[in-house]
Image: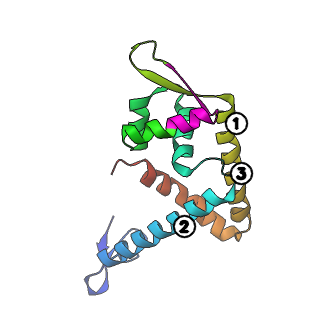
Amino acid sequence: MTRTGDAGAVLDAGDRPAPEPREIEDDATRLYVALGRLARTLRRSGPAEIGPGSFSALATVVRSGPIRLGDLAAREGVAPPTLTRIVAALEQGGYLSRDTDPQDRRAVRVSATDQGTGLVLGLRSARSGWLRERIAALPPAERGRLEAALPILESLADSDG
């Protein structure tokens, strides 16, 4: 519910002025930069046996189970030739295996090996641990604000926008 306050400013339910478009732009830029820096820091926080693009593809296979190469390329947002190189390197490293799709013998599926699954789960654990330590070091009030913001951040991440 909104109402008009002094000088015609629109107030929200919390009686705070609605943000100006410039403030929203500044907030979006700050969020973009902060998330980018946090993602880079997290990528560096654990052992990295493979690059970020390969890790992302491997994590998708671990999460989704056996998947056709075309479907994996679409999920990762990469061109099929790029994905073919990534999959070849992951297969050579022992992280993925290929087999024929039982539904369509012309198609190839990839599956994570035990080594690939272990790498993904271990790296996620290491990165989550690093983040958990940082969050634990925050003052209680900041941890509360972060917890309150999580549903909003999850919603932004899940939108197809």
x and y percentages locating residue 34 in the rendered image: 52, 68
Q: Quadrant of residue 14?
A: bottom left
x and y percentages locating residue 78 in the rendered image: 39, 44
**Mark 2 or 3, nearer chain start:** 2
Q: Is 118 or 92 nearer to us in this picture?
A: 92
- Contact between marks 1 and 3 (CB within 8 A): the answer is no
Q: CA distance from mark 1 to mark 2?
A: 26 Å
Range covered by the magenta-colored residues: 87-99
Left or right: 133 in relation to 155: right
x and y percentages locating residue 54 in the rendered image: 54, 44
Left or right: 143 in relation to 103: right
Local crowd at mark 3 within 10 Å, few (<14), some, or many (≥20)? some
Local crowd at mark 2 within 10 Å, few (<14), some, or many (≥20)? few
Local crowd at mark 1 within 10 Å, few (<14), some, or many (≥20)? some
Q: Quadrant of residue 22?
A: bottom left
**Residue under circle 3?**
126
Type of residue at label 3?
Ala
Residue 70, numbered label: none
**Residue under circle 1?**
118
Q: CA distance from mark 2 to mark 3?
A: 18 Å
Q: Secondary structure at mark 2?
A: helix
x and y percentages locating residue 137 in the rendered image: 74, 68
Relative height, residue 159 to residue 87 (above, below)? below
- The residue positioned 33% from the left and 52% from the top of the image is 161
Q: Secondary structure at mark 1?
A: helix
Q: Quadrant of residue 79?
A: top left
**Residue under circle 2?**
37
Type of residue at label 2?
Arg
Left or right: 18 in relation to 56: left
**Mark 1 or 2, nearer chain start:** 2
Q: Is 41 or 88 nearer to us in this picture?
A: 88
